[in-house]
Amino acid sequence: MRANVASYDVVAPETLAEALTLLADEPGVWTPMAGGTDLMVLFEAGKLPTGRYLSIHGLPELRGITVDDDAVTIGALTTYSEIRDHAVINADLPMLAQAARETGALAIQNRGTLGGNIANASPAADSPPALVAYGAELTLVSAAGTRTVPYRGFHTGYKQMDLRPGELIHSIRVPRRPASEGWVHFYRKVGTRAYQAISKVCFAACARLSDGGVAEVRVGFGSVAPTVLIASALEAALTGARLDDAGLEAAVAAAARHEVAAIDDIRSTARYRTQVSENLAVAFLHALRAGG
Amino acid sequence: MGKYVGQSVPRKEGVDKVTGRSLYVDDIVLDGMIHGITVRSSVPRGKILGVRFDPGVPWDEFVIVTAKDIPGRNVVAMLIEDQPFLADDVIRHPDEPVLLLAHPDKHVLAEAREHVHIDVEPLPAVFAIEDALRADTVLFGDDNVFKRFDVSKGDVDAAFARDDVVIVEGTYETGAQEQMYIEPMGMIAVAAPGQGVTVWGSLQCPYYVHKALKPLFDLPAEQVRVVQTVTGGGFGGKEEYPSIIAGHAALLSWKAGGVPVKLIYDRAEDLAATTKRHPSRTRHRTAVTRDGELVAMDVDFALDGGAYATLSAVVLSRGTIHACGPYRCPNARVVARAVATNHPPHGAFRGFGAPQSIFGLERHMDKIARTLGIAPEELRRRNLLATGDTTATSQVIEEAIDLGAMLDDALSQAGWAEKKAAFAAHNADPANTVKKGMGLATFFHGSGFTGSGEVYLASVVGIEAGPGGRCTVLAASTEIGQGTNTIFSQIAADALRLPYELVEVAQPDTARVPDSGPTVASRTTMVVGRLVQDAAESLIHTLRDAGLLGADYSAEQFAAAVDAYRERFGTLRVYSKYKQPPGIVWDDKHYRGAAYAAYGWAAYIAEVEVDTLTYAARVTDFVAVQDIGTLINPLLAAGQVEGGVAQAIGWAVYEGVDWRDGHMANNQMTNYIIPTAADVPPIRVYFHSVPFKYGPSGAKGVGELPMDGPAPAILNAIEDAIGVSLNRAPALPEDIMEAMLAASSQSEAHHG
Amino acid sequence: MAEVAVGKVAVTFTVNGVERTVETYPMARLLDVLREDLRLTGTKEGCGEGECGACSAFVDGRLVNTCLVPAIQARGAKIETIEGLASGAELHAVQQAFIDAGGAQCGICTPGMVLATVALLREHPEPTEAEVREGLAGNLCRCTGYMKIFDSVETAARAIRARQDAATAGEGGAS
Ligand SMILES: Cc1cc2nc3c(=O)[nH]c(=O)nc-3n(C[C@H](O)[C@H](O)[C@H](O)COP(=O)(O)OP(=O)(O)OC[C@H]3O[C@@H](n4cnc5c(N)ncnc54)[C@H](O)[C@@H]3O)c2cc1C
Ligand code: FES
Ligand code: FES
């Protein structure tokens, strides 16, 4: 333990309204804490800023998964275990279930939340690529009210996002992508080992096929840019393409290589991340051919 | 075999461990105890200019210790006395202890450490083995060489000049490896002038700590007491470094006037500051006939010893002796050197130098096989040592061994022939992006200390019989998870012909137990276990000589005899002392002769998958066949092998230390990757048990052997899978990618 | 030094069925509260960063890393630690299995590993190998190579089933 526990205040309001009031009354003073699986690691290392923390962990308003015909709405405090075990998510949004199952290991999945994964804004987080590929939307809540923003574009730079002071992530709405409607899902986390692994590259792609062509496709990468990467070049190369186009492989590889902006760090090298990104993009194409 | 030896009797301390009742050092609280912390340098090499304390911290609440406060000599007594407890003047590695703080509140302490600054004038540092050997910058002596050994057999140069031999060359490297015992190191000390020094802690070798504390405080032996608490893994990592932590905790307590001080490392500090497996480089030049008979081996073996000599000479010695492996070769030359760098000192880790040199050799054997177009198993089979052959140190193997039979067994358990064929077909299909391969290694590992080491150690073990005939084994050998308590109890119970429950092993405490030597070198079962057996037998003789015990006796009769003896003479305690088995002659000067009294022998086979999209290698099956003599406890023995293999899998494909200016930059569990339950293959363990005449009931050592073979077997398998040669362990995905890209650009250049 | 001077607060929860109240800092790790305030030292610290699982305990029926839980978030919770697993002198089937099958070597990972096994078997009474590996992946062991731990899980699963079968048979006989 490298931090002084006496330098951290934590309060745990009982209701969302109370929490939002506190955030509004003392702007910039309170940092939310959900499952703590990111913040407590910083605390242990002596790298968590001292100050005041607002535990939202117990707030019932931010929990739970609701399903309607078009979408699944996931409360920000929903844990990976809840996501992993949810039948509709497994059926229609399998990449989210897989991301949850491959996040940390059981005890982390029991505590870590989807909202925390987003707001922590780590480029190496594993759910964001899937949320990008699914075209998710976020509902943000503050004392001033709520607003809804597309997840694609929420992260604006390294550890920066479109989250205003006093605002919390309320929930994440993800459109359903059933296989019966032609959706193909392709998720690959490349970690340092099978579990308890931080990603070196994470790739998530979801496409709708029709008539031997790609009608619609969204792709997200993790760990290859300062934020989760929306692979627009790759999406452009694939959208409208015919799967039997012999030149597609090269186009897909070039697009992936071109748009990742990977760096060397303690977990891997830029060269590795770039090459693996390219390989996974091509593997996705092969999967589309196999599945289409 | 007796009633208990050979049986998988339950672990002595099993109940305490599964209920959480076992007390590890951090679980212990003494009255009035305060906490200690270490302030370290942050540059790899330099001159200390001064220490600054930030204002605003109530420093008078702290106990502060620097080198100036040391009552005795500021040197960690080991082989060469070069390492200080606290750096005074020069810094030789980036995690060197400079100053100690203690405070009743550990949270305040952690924060205060950030407010102490050590000003250092940097000096040029050296990190690579080759740079150290070049000695442009001199860190130690005049050539940076801590220790050099030369082995010579036959006439190597003449053999290389023969015209019927093929010469195969190769260079192989291994990286540092962290022991990663799950319990970080720690100590509690009570020390004060006039009262002496007592430490309790997580450690492997109580008498090493004892030896280090005496000069530090300038105290006689009887005023220093070292007690081992339940220890959460060691693997060699808790062999030498605990002396430093014990010294630090005791210095703080001494300065605080005898207040107990607890000094526990957090994971980050344990990873950065304590010893790791020595990085190595091995160069092989081998002369071999076209049909695969080894004619001459020329080996240049080098270890990065880090900033201080510590145990590097001993690690180097074992690496040297194992460098030519279990192969018959009439001409051999090994030049081995351990060099100084500005890394934190490297130290003991399961295998002790042998895994490094065996890695080079077993990768090289595959290269020779490929060069000659002989199957790797066949090349080995043609050269395996048999009874009567001589090793590279000219030791005649007298044990009845059949390594060829072990190899055959391993091949058949692994399904080698069938799988090799199936994998070749699978790999030929470009649609299969996951490639499969198999690799093997045959090797040996000497049990006990090298050469005359055991004679110098002159280990002693005692047994005491108490009321009701309860017997206690007195030894400084520690239980670190490997089963010492259980195995000693089994051996003693059989030798005493008493129920297992009536025998226990004393907590290692230098005030109570004799020096049975360090718990290292696969010596605890074979060497110390034998002493337990001898002591037990002489205890029986003592009772018989006193006319108190007949030829046959029940536990009750034994108890009555003990009670009668104790009534008459006070205590009943006997000791046994190490005796060298006959015929063990070792010439330390020429590094020639019987290096070890006995060897463990093994043939291991790894099966891997390499994903060519992510370049990750995964071990999918593992077969470990070995002869470690009689099994005292089959369950524990298998557990040792499985644990060793898993650690070696980590070393082969997961565990890389990321050095930045001599400091381990990935010093967190999240960034230094050891295998989880989902990363290990089935590890299938088979024993061929040939009893060793001088071991207790025929047992030899097992602890280290399983660390030796897996890494080369795995890298051999990777090459089998992808057709690309990797000559450095670990082979991380990034390394495999670079090797594959280099190979494909080379072959494109060829075709183009 | 401290910019925010924080006082201790009272936190009440149940531990192994007994209601306890501690005065501690809201940010204090549940791990330290258990080990230092309640002297339940069976919960171990191997890393402090959620990686090793040595600090595992159940909070409201779910296995968590107590090094990552601030005390304030344990308010009102039901906590179960290794100390509460055995009933009196009788070991839990999982504990007995770890002794019989050699699942504990140095023992430092064992309390966490035993609790992770309990969690696993609650979820999957007859786990597949893949389920065992996944279920225990958050608990690092450096001694065993995991093989004897897998054997322990299997032994425990069998013992629990046998106990349940006996119980049902017993009930059947009684009726
Ligand atoms: C051992 C270990 C393994 C891990 N493995 C993985 C992995 O494989 N993949 C992965 O992606 N992550 C991993 N993580 C990281 C972490 O578990 C996840 O990022 C998790 O989702 C964080 O959620 P939390 O609720 O615990 O966040 P917290 O630590 O509570 O918070 C994280 C950040 O989010 C903010 N925040 C939380 N909730 C909200 C909200 N509703 N509104 C606004 N801000 C909010 C907090 O202020 C903080 O800045 C791992 C962590 C550990 C310790
Ligand atoms: S101490 Fe909590 S996971 Fe390691
Ligand atoms: S038994 Fe030692 S870490 Fe698992």
Image (cartoon, coloured by chain):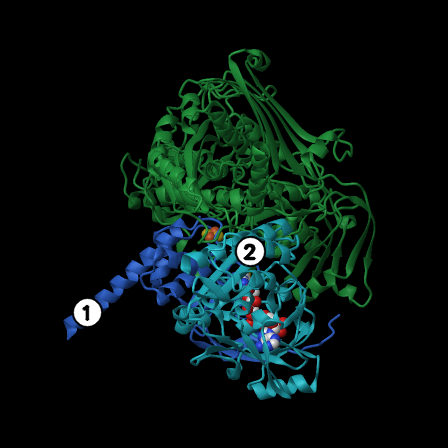
Chain colours: A cyan, B green, C blue
Under mark 1, the amino acid is Gly
Q: Please say whether residue C110 is visible from this viewpoint.
A: no
Q: Is residue B161 positioned above or below B20 on the image?
A: above
Task: Please give the chain letter of the residue carrying mark 1.
Answer: C
Q: Please say whether residue B723 is visible from this viewpoint.
A: yes
Under mark 2, the amino acid is Val
Q: On the picture, is A24 further left or further right than B433?
A: right
Q: Tell me the element at label 2.
A: helix
Q: On the picture, is B685 further left or further right than A147?
A: left
Give the camera-side residue of B7 and A159.
A159
Residue B262 x/y as whole percent: 63, 58
Give the camera-side residue of B203 and A258.
A258
Residue B679 x/y as whole percent: 46, 51
Task: Please give the chain letter of the residue carrying mark 2.
Answer: A
Query: Which residue is rendered at x = 42% and y = 59% of the image?
Result: C134
Q: CA distance from mark 2 to mark 1?
A: 66 Å
Q: Tag count in the figure?
A: 2
Q: On the picture, is B562 further left or further right than B232?
A: left
Q: Tell me the element at label 1.
A: helix
Q: Do marks 2 and 1 both belong to one polypeptide chain?
A: no
Residue B529: image quadrant is: top left
Residue A30: image quadrant is: bottom right
Mark 2 = which residue?
A252
Residue B727: image quadrant is: top right
Residues at discs 2 and 1 in contact (Cβ within 8 Å)? no
Q: Quadrant of the C terminus of chain C?
A: bottom left
Q: Is residue B677 positioned above or below A180 on the image?
A: above
Mark 1 = which residue?
C170
Q: Is residue B390 positioned above or below B283 on the image?
A: above
